[in-house]
Image (cartoon, rainbow, N blue to C red):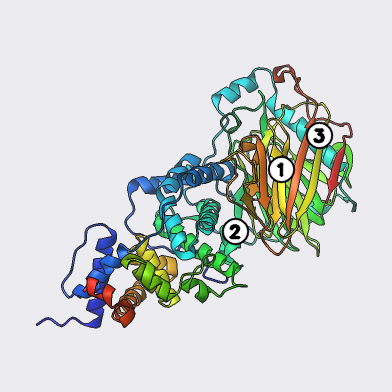
Amino acid sequence: MYWPSQRQRESAVNHYWNSVVEGAPSAPAGLDRGLAGLIDAVAASDASPKPERAFVDRLEAHLMGQAVWKSPVPQPDYLPGTENVSSSRSVANDSRRFRLPGSGERSRLKAGLSWFSAQAAFVVLLILIAGGIASIYLLGNDGEEGEREIPAVVDSTDRATPVDEDVMSTLAAADIDPEVMFPGGPEGWTEAHFLLVELRPGETNLITFCEGCQTPALMMVMEGQVDLSINGPVYRVAERGEARTPEKTEGKQLIQLHAGDAVIFDIHIDSATERIVNTSNANAQYLLGALPRNPCVQVTFANLPKLFTISRPLPPMTDAPLGLTIEEITIDPHSRFAFEITDGRQELYLLSSGALTAVTAEGQEPGNRLTSSWRVPTGMQVDRYPAGSYFFQNDAEEPAKLYRLSVAYDPVSDPATIESPAMPEACPTLPMIFDG
Amino acid sequence: MSGNAMLSPYSFQSTAQSDDELDLVRRAAGDPQAFALLYRQYVESIYRYCYRRLGSKEASEDATQIIFEKAIAALPRIDPNSPFRAWLFTIAHNTVIDIARAHRHARTLDDIAEFTIFDPAPTPEDMAIELDERDRLSALIRQLPDRERRLLDLRIAGLNDREIADVMGMSHGAVRTAQYRALQKLKGMMASDTDRKLAHVLA
């Protein structure tokens, strides 16, 4: 008679269970028939319901809209201390290309709108607007900062970190085709991305642009001070919140930025890697914008206590006045927050702390709900959803905080008629409100 | 936030994975459409796994959303040759634990294991009256020690022993031993007076 050992009994059970999972039950020698029946019963015991179709579709739309598709981080050869950045980031790099603007978009751009310069103009406008509100300190730039070294990037894959940090340590701007995502939007709308990033003292972020991307980008320091290093030219366009004639700094120089300082990156370089280091003893925050039609911005975070990623259509680039408003909204515990989505309205929301739950208010159109929850660090691209009223509730005991970004602009008649401004040397001061 | 094991996309052993899925995983980090196909393939199993662990529609929807958001964020660091299902369920496993811990001001994780986060299970007396045999077995599974219950939940989700080992950070041998013990315990529980009927059916 065959008397299997304990290990053989365990293996027989395991073998049978694997075969049940694969849909082809096969009972090996030594299998306890009673346990085999129990395995069958356990496998059939799942009474959990399928997800509702509406939820599956809504979540898919949400993920496709706010996903952060990205390419690997190239290793900048000029930056010190990057040798130990994990090579694992290069996995499958060839397959991780971003979608470029579609042919229709390109043809429209060729039709007279100098896309690049127009974007740069908008970047400058945006920064100048932002500069009007931002604070505070100024340290002199003595021109010798290029000699300094900045700390090496801490690779989150090489150290013990909380789970959230591990899985969220790299994020990039979303890749959204406005013609697909905003079919009802005004002709010529373009897209922008903003990241509001918080850096703890001593932390470093890398901002990487993919090869071949033509990406004007802005960075504005909201709090604290940071050192910036980039391998291409950078233009300082605001200082201490004051607009200024763009001051060009050649690549590979170290630039010290303080609250209220803003820069834009040279738009003609093929590949740029920006390193941002918080050299102060306090937390620093900066706003990174990539404008527009930019599926390529990649941000690698050594640490990520706070992050927002948003994208939205913006009007065609123009030198017409633009107003930008950033507000912080607090939703008290067990309170409800309502907002309206109106076609063409330039407004969006970012959740900075807490969590909100979508609720259906009385009189609301059935099905007119956003995805069921809204959590940090997920930004909500409310523009993607049909016009109407939306309601969120803070069910927690702690307040939830939102940022609201609003853009006000003068309507533009025909994008093709817009002249292509060169990199502006001076820009008008435009109104901006910041309630922080 | 969570103190449980870190997500380690590189630690997975290679197991059977179709060429199509390998290709999708390779492309998913930079191709939303590829990710969408993976999403459609796994959203139901992830949702149902969350439902088993959390016990309510709202909690399961929230968890499913968080899991796929985390997956998107972590995709660039996945080894495309590693089994995607185990990788995704590792995120799900940790996320469910995080959610449970977020609610532990009201209940401990063990409490949640026995009941649910939002909808406490009925009493044994209620179960005896109302539940059919399948539900009764599910109720007994929820009475197992936490690790064994999690293991069976992953089995029910369709994972094999190697995938479960990856998800739970255990050796294959430990998984085999734990699942065997879990079955023996279940068998013993069903042999008790209150579950004699079910034991008879399964005999």
Q: Which residue is mark 2?
A: A83
Question: Marks 3 and 1: same chain?
Answer: yes
Q: What whole-number distance in Å separates the C-alpha atoms at marks 2 and 1?
A: 48 Å
Which residue occupies the foreground of this view, A431 or A46? A46
* Residue type, label 3: Leu
Which residue occupies the foreground of this view, A317 or B93? B93
Which quadrant of the rendered structure holds the N terminus of chain A?
A: bottom left
The image position of residue B109, as x and y in percent, is 53, 73
**Disc 2 + disc 1, Cβ < 8 Å:** no
The image position of residue A65, as x and y in percent, is 57, 41
Q: Earlier in the sequence, mark 2 or mark 1?
A: 2
Which image quarter: residue B48? bottom left
Horizontal side of A349 relative to A256 (left or right) equals: left
Question: Marks 2 and 1: same chain?
Answer: yes
Q: What whole-number distance in Å separates the C-alpha atoms at marks 3 and 1?
A: 27 Å
Is there any visible trace of residue A217 in the rendered image? yes
Residue A366 has which mark? none
The image position of residue B202, as x and y in percent, is 23, 71
Which chain does the numbered disc 1 sit on?
A: A
Looking at the rendered image, the disc whose residue lies closer to the viewer, 2 or 3, is 3
Q: Which residue is mark 3?
A: A125
Q: What whole-number distance in Å separates the C-alpha atoms at marks 2 and 3?
A: 38 Å
In the image, what residue occupies the spot 81% across and 56% down? A225
SS label for mark 3: helix
In the image, what residue occupies the spot 54% across and 39% down? A98
